[in-house]
Image: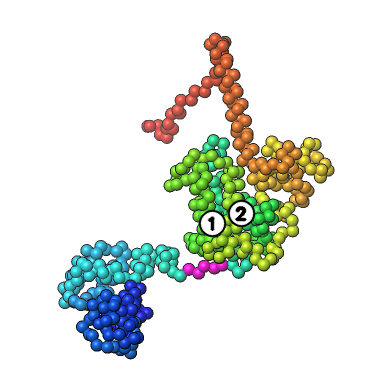
Amino acid sequence: MTAVGLAELTDAARRQAMSRFEVLRPHIEDGVPLIRAAGQAGVPPGPRSGGCSATELPAGLAGLAPARRRATGRRTDPELVRLIEGMALHRPCPSLATITRRAARVAAAQGWKPVSYNTVRSIVTAIDPAMTTLAHDGAAAFRDTCELVYRRRADHPNAMWQVDHTQLDILIDDSGTAKRPWLTAVLDDCSRAVPGYTVTLGAPSALNTSLALRQAIWTKPDPTWPMCGIPEILYVDHGGDFVSDHLAQVAADLKFQIVHSAVARPQGRGKVERFFGSINTELLTELPGHLVGGKPVTPPALSLRQLDEAIGAFITTYHRRVHSEIGVTPQDCWVGHGWLPRMPEDLEQLDLLLVRVAAARVVHRDGIHFQGLRYLHPALAAYVRESVTIRYDPRDITEIRVFHKNRFLCKAVSPDHTGDTIGLKDIQAARRAYRRRIRDQINERIAVVTDYLPAPDRPPVPSKPAKPPPAPPLRAYRED
């Protein structure tokens, strides 16, 4: 039997030692006979019934803990143990039965005591898991599971923003077609606030990133969403939109640094990934079309705009609840004790840098025509029949920004939709619906002709041209 220090005891051993001390406390402190103290506690006394004092417990509380038993039985030769561990760390790892057979042959040849299957299993399972991971799975798996991770946090708001994309676990109704949207989010590393985001149907692109950054940098009309400004560092991965020349030019002009995470190392982007998890598990589960295991639980019913509005409402709520890691709300952390973020000179300069959706148009006498809408502004009167460049936000095309020879002219609006918000997807959906309605009217009238006119008087139905006969194979030689 061997005694150990109190610091080396397990919780169960400490509790057992303390219960034994409570039995002995009247005897040690008040001099109550041991037999009476044991009887009061309902514990039968041990073979010793004489008196004792606290000084007679040289090991302290640890002396009352159950002592560890010394290992008994035959000990395995240390060289044989190292041999078994070496075989277990081999790649690919042999089975325990194979290791046992090989160890038995070596032990017989070296004159060592043989080992059983259970002994081999206990030796193998006692190997350090980090050593097993590095030996069997390689350096990448060891790095991702066993190495110490440094979790950085920015010292102040807007010191570092993270940007990333994710495909949401939901299907939306895009003019009768179910589609799975993408979310691009900008996250402030210090406060965990979300200054900007964008929801699109297309795969991640430089445009999605530009629209999210535009919203993040500029002020929002919602007073409960104060996050804005230019970051000092933009922390991104190696996606094509994040290594583009366009983003590098934007960073140079707005004076912020782009830092790329290590290749195949997602740990550095865990904060924005956690926000994506909150969106998927807290918001999307309550919406129609939510996906579980790749299959929708309910039929998709939301449009892209409705999903965008739902995510925006969730973000404003997310900003006002206490974050478990930082201990305060993201909004309070971002606002802090009051500070002024660094801002671009004006929104037109920001649009010229970020909003890359541009189109060339001619100014007509009644304005600029674009996507079936008409845009007017008094400043256009001096540019009738002139070619201009328009830039617009696909999420809201009720307003366009007009440039003439790379110089900003004005913000032209559609007078028919003043105060409304119309997205490009809404225009495209309306076009498809109009085309289907016209097609239905055509088919309805053709059906009337079929009902009332006899067959000889019916207009001929155009037939598909017959396919030409296949050409004979090319003869390369006279003998073929």
- Residue 275 badge: 1
Q: Looking at the figure, which quarter contains the N terminus?
A: bottom left
1 vs 2, front mark: 2
Q: Position of residue 351 (x, y in %)?
A: 70, 52
Q: Secondary structure at mark 1?
A: helix
Residue count near mark 1 (Cα–Cα under 10 Å), binned few <14, some 14–19, many ≥20: some
Task: Kindly tell me whether residue 310 is visible in this rendering.
Answer: yes
Q: Amino acid at mark 2?
A: Thr
Of the image marks 1 and 2, the number of the one nearer the N terminus? 1
Q: Position of residue 449 (x, y in %)?
A: 57, 15
Q: Secondary structure at mark 2?
A: helix
Residue extending furthest toward the right: 382
Residue situated in front as seen by the camera: 449 or 253? 449
- Residue 316 badge: 2
Residue situated in front as seen by the camera: 317 or 77? 317
Residue extending furthest toward the bottom: 55
x 22%, y 67%: residue: 118
